[in-house]
Amino acid sequence: MDTTQVYTNQVQYNYGTKHEQPIEIVKTNSEGKTETQKIVYPPDYGTLSSTTNGIKNLKDNNVLVPIEQYLTVNTNVISGTLTTFKPSLPVPDVVYSLETTSPIALTNFTHSNKTANAFSMDTRYVPRLNYQQYDTKGNLEVVSKSDDSKIIYLWSDNKIYPIAEVVNGEYGKVAYTSFESGLNEGNWTFAGSTSGTSIAKTGLYFYTLTPTISISKSLPAGKYILEYFAKAPVSITGSGLSVAPVSTSLADSNGWIFYKNEVTLTGPVTMILNASSGSVLIDEVRVYPLGAAMKTYTYKPLVGVASVTDINGATTFYEYDVFNRLKLVRDDRGKILKTYQYQYKNQK
C-alpha cells in the first residue's frame, strides 16, 4: 500500500428551494468517480390538478416523504425506487423498482418530475410491493410482493396493536381473537362478557361459551384451519359445514388444550362455536384458509408484547419488571428461554 498517497471522499448535500430536504447527495472520491443520489419530494412536482398517484394529497397536507430516489454514477442511472400513495390517505400504494440490465444514460431516463406541474414514470419501473388495503386509521391490512402471496394483518379493536399476521391468506377468510378488547375483535363476532384472570392462555382475558353464548365468523366456501385453546372440545356448527379433527394436545398446567381442525364449507357459511352443554372456557381462536400460516400476538397495554403464538400453535410469553422492562421470556411449558438484567454503569 502506498502510504504517501492521499485518498479523499467528498460528500455534498444540495437542498431544494421548495422545502428544506436534500434533493441531491453527491459523493466524489479521489479517482474522480461521482455518485449522485437524487431525491424527489411532493413539492418538487409543482402545481398538480388531480390526485396524481396520491402526491397532491401529500403536498396539500405538507407530508414530506420521498416519492422517487435514483442513483447515478457519473452520467448513468444504475438504480431507482419510486413510491405512489393512496389518493386520500398519506400511506404507500405501490413501490416500484427500476429494472435494467445495464446502466441508463441520464438523458434517456424519465425522472418523475421531469415535466413541470406533472408526474411521469420511467417505463423501466416495475411494481415490487402492493399495499392493497388499510383500515380507517391508516393501519396496513393487506400487502403483497409482485408474483408472491399476500400478507394479511389484523389489528386490535382500538387499532393500536397488530394482533395477527397471515401469510398466503385473504382478508375476508381470516379471523383471530384472544378476547382482549371485550368487543368484537379480529373479524370474530361475539356477545357476552370476557373474563380476565391469570389463567387466560394468552393475554389477560378468555371467553366462556355456553349453548346460548357463542362466537361466530362468516366465511365463503373453501377449506379452512380452525385452531383454539379450550378446557374441553367445543361445538362447531353451520349449514353445509363439515369438521375433521387434525390434532389435539395434552392439557397444560392450567388445563388448556390446543385443538386443530380442518373445516370444509360447501358454500357461504356463518361458522358458530359454542358449548353443546354446560360451559367451556376458550381462548386464542384462529381461522385461516388451508395452506396459509398465521402468527398471533397479545400485548400488555403501554408496555409491550405479552405473548406470540407461532404458526404451529406454540406460545412464547414475555414478562416485564416493575419498570416495564423485559425481564423473562418463557416457552409454552413455562421454561425460561432468556433472562434480562439491568445495571447502571459502575454498579456492582
Image: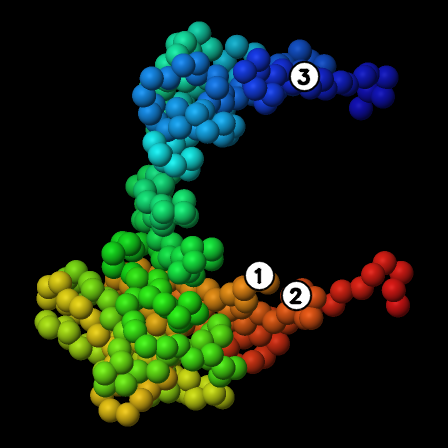
Give the answer, above or below, for where 58 lies relative to 193: above
* Mark sitting earlier along the chain (3/1): 3
- Answer with left or right where residue 173 lies relative to residue 75: left
Report how far apart the C-alphas of labels 3 and 1 lie in the structure.
Answer: 42 Å
Contact between marks 1 and 2 (CB within 8 A): the answer is yes
In percent of width and height, residue 136 lies at 36, 47
Which residue is at a point 34% across and 23% down the rendered structure image? 52
Disc marking residue 324: 2
Give the amino acid at mark 2: Asn
Report how far apart the C-alphas of labels 1 and 2 lie in the structure.
Answer: 9 Å
- Answer with left or right where residue 156 lies relative to residue 10: left
Which residue is at a point 23% across and 83% down the rendered structure image? 212
In percent of width and height, residue 329 lies at 60, 71
From the image, tell me which residue sits under label 3.
12
Give the amino acid at mark 3: Gln
From the image, tell me which residue sits under label 1.
302
Locate residue 45: give its quadrant: top left
Which residue is at a point 53% across and 19% down the rendered structure image? 38
Which residue is at a point 48% across and 72% down the rendered structure image? 203
**Are there few (<14), some (14-19), or many (20+) residues within 10 Å of tag 1?**
few
Locate residue 249: give its quadrant: bottom left
Helix, strand or loop for disc 2: loop
**Are there few (<14), some (14-19), or many (20+) residues within 10 Å of tag 2?**
few
* Mark sitting earlier along the chain (1/2): 1
Front-lying residue, 236 or 2: 236
Give the amino acid at mark 1: Leu
